[in-house]
Image: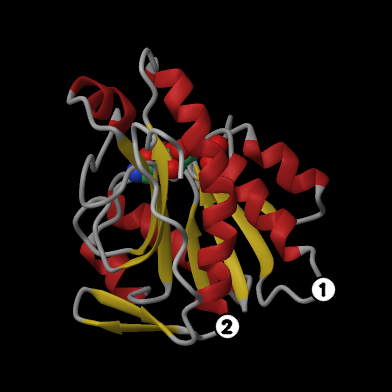
Amino acid sequence: MKIGILISGRGSNMQALVEACKAPDYPAEAAVVISNRPDALGLEYARYSGIPALVVDHKAYASRTDFEVDLHAALKDHGVELVCNAGFMRLLTKGFVDKWRDRQINIHPSLLPAYKGLHSHERAIAEGVKITGCSVHFVRTEMDSGPIIAQAAVQVLAHDEPGDLAARVLQAEHKLYPHALRLVAEGRTRITGNIVTIDGESTPSPVLFSPGLYPPG
Ligand code: GAR
């Protein structure tokens, strides 16, 4: 499955997807990386990896819709079948989202539907949650919403600063996103309303307790 990866900045999740795509048995191929910002750091890595890396600069357009016409055309030109938002920080209009319905996924650094939008880690820490994490979901018009494909849980530790937590969640993101993309690219995801079921789902992981059980066991 040919994927187009949308970024706005550092692009570490894009990098995780591109690395996963290099494995011979991985069911997706990175066809293009597109940034809405010319200064996005991730563009360099994409070019270094030999993947077409384009800028569709939103500031060069009079309206969101005009920007999206060119974004859509660039994805189509590269034969993209699935769009992967990887730190793409631009809201997309209903027109674009509908064109890619069930063919566009996003990663967000929280256990959705909690902490949509910006500053997820600051808010999780401020509210004293003990477990947070990250989610990969199909994109719908409302920001950071849509049928959830996969999630990973991460402990919030005492004295965590937002940056500490963000770094641990990011490590989980880099494992979760390639995993979720594999499920989609293998055609194992079924969407019914807002619910995704996975064909041949694997055995459950152990429960994560936070704080940990004492004595451990
Ligand atoms: C990641 O933590 C991603 O989950 C988040 O932006 C970061 C991008 O980092 N995305 C969102 O908040 C989307 N609402 P990256 O550029 O290194 O992948």
Residue in the picture at 31% in, 44% down: 62
Residue 203 horizontal side relative to residue 44, left or right: left
Is there CB contact under 8 Å for labels 2 and 1? no
Q: Compare residues 176 and 84 and report the one nearer the observer.
A: 176
Residue assigned mark 1: 24
On screen, 194 above or below 146? below
In the image, farthest residue toward the front: 215
- Residue 96 spot, x, y in % from top left: 32, 66
Q: Secondary structure at mark 2?
A: loop
Q: Compare residues 18 and 57 and report the one nearer the observer.
A: 18
What amino acid is labelled 1 in the image? Answer: Pro
Residue 3 horizontal side relative to residue 214, left or right: right
Residue assigned mark 2: 186
Residue 2 horizontal side relative to residue 127, left or right: right
Is residue 81 among the parts visible in the rendering? no
On screen, 74 above or below 57? below
The crowd level at tag 2 (other Cα within 10 Å; few <14, some 14-19, many 20+) is: some
Q: Compare residues 62 and 126 and report the one nearer the observer.
A: 126
- Residue 160 spot, x, y in % from top left: 39, 17
Q: Quadrant of residue 45?
A: top right
- Residue 100 spot, x, y in % from top left: 37, 73
Label 2 CB, ligand 1: below 8 Å? no
What amino acid is labelled 2 in the image? Answer: Glu
Residue in the picture at 68% in, 64% down: 30
Residue 210 horizontal side relative to residue 79, left or right: left
On screen, 99 above or below 177? below
First along the sequence among labels 2 and 1: 1
Residue in the picture at 36% in, 62% down: 137
- Tally the marks: 2
